[in-house]
Amino acid sequence: MKTSITFLRHAQTDANIKGEFHGRLDLPLNDTGQKQAREAAEKLKGENFDVVIYGRARRVEQTAQAVLEHLKNKPEALFQANEIREMDFGVFEGMHYREIAEQYPDEWEKYMNDWQTYTFPQGDNISDYYQSCGNWIDSIAEKYCKKKILIVGHKGFILNCVSALLTQDGSDVLKRDIGNAQTLTVQL
């Protein structure tokens, strides 16, 4: 049996609709997001996950709880992990890219020109964030080898983990996408 890791992105928040940067901001699901979480739960209810891990942000917890209520079997391991977090966008938190470009034109230009190594003012460095996601997912894959794993998290976290697993190259993070309440499965 192979190790199977299914990533589930949290369901929709108002900030997702507005296109705002939100990493450390602790936002709840909106009405559409609550519906999406229930639909994701319905799709996953027949799955037998050995391990379920989810982050501590409210939007992730709400999505995970909807799924956990519908799983037919209780996982062997179930826990929250501080490592499952979105990137900290620093002073850009809660802002749309147009606002950032207007209010921080020099910083926005730096970000656009070198997104792979950029450090958000008062926030995360992108390459360090990629490395921490990669280290964490590698440790989970090793610890739960040959298990079926569900990880509920954020878009940036998921895409960085998938790149680390598949290519070990942070430059391809943006070659994939995952929508709200969608899943992506990797088999190792």
Image (cartoon, rainbow, N blue to C red):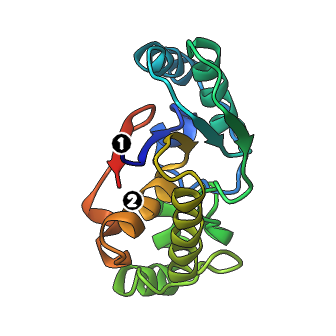
User: 163 above or below 115?
Assistant: above
Which residue position holds label 1? 184
Would you call the spot at circle 2 few (<14 residues within 10 Å), some (14-19), or many (20 or more)? many
Q: As drawn, is 150 to the left or to the right of 98?
A: right
Evaluate if marks 1 and 2 touch, with contact meaning CB atoms under 8 Å apart: yes
Q: Position of residue 39 (x, y in %)?
A: 45, 15
Q: Position of residue 114 (x, y in %)?
A: 39, 87
Q: Mark 1 belongs to which amino acid? A: Leu
**Which element carries disc 1, helix, strand or loop?**
strand
Quadrant location, the C terminus: bottom left
For the residue pair 42 and 147, the one nearer the viewer reads as: 147
Q: As drawn, is 92 to the left or to the right of 56?
A: left
Q: Which residue is drawn at 54% across and 61% down?
A: 142
Q: Residue at x 54, y 37 (%)?
A: 10
Q: Position of residue 47 (x, y in %)?
A: 45, 22
Q: Mark 2 belongs to which amino acid? A: Val
For the residue pair 116 and 83, the one nearer the viewer reads as: 83
Quadrant location, the N terminus: top left
Observer able to see residue 29: no
User: 165 above or below 186?
Assistant: below
For the residue pair 18 and 25, the one nearer the viewer reads as: 25
Q: Splitting the image into 4 quarters, where does residue 57 fall? A: top right
Which numbered disc flags the more N-terminal residue, 1 or 2?
2
Extreme-left residue of the structure: 175
Which residue position holds label 2? 162
**Which element carries disc 2, helix, strand or loop?**
helix
Extreme-front residue of the structure: 1
Q: As drawn, is 85 to the left or to the right of 7?
A: right
Q: As drawn, is 81 to the left or to the right of 114?
A: right
User: 32 above or below 54?
Assistant: above
| Mark 1 → mark 2, Cα distance in angstroms | 9 Å
Q: Where is residue 93 in the image (x, y as percent from the top left)?
A: 64, 60
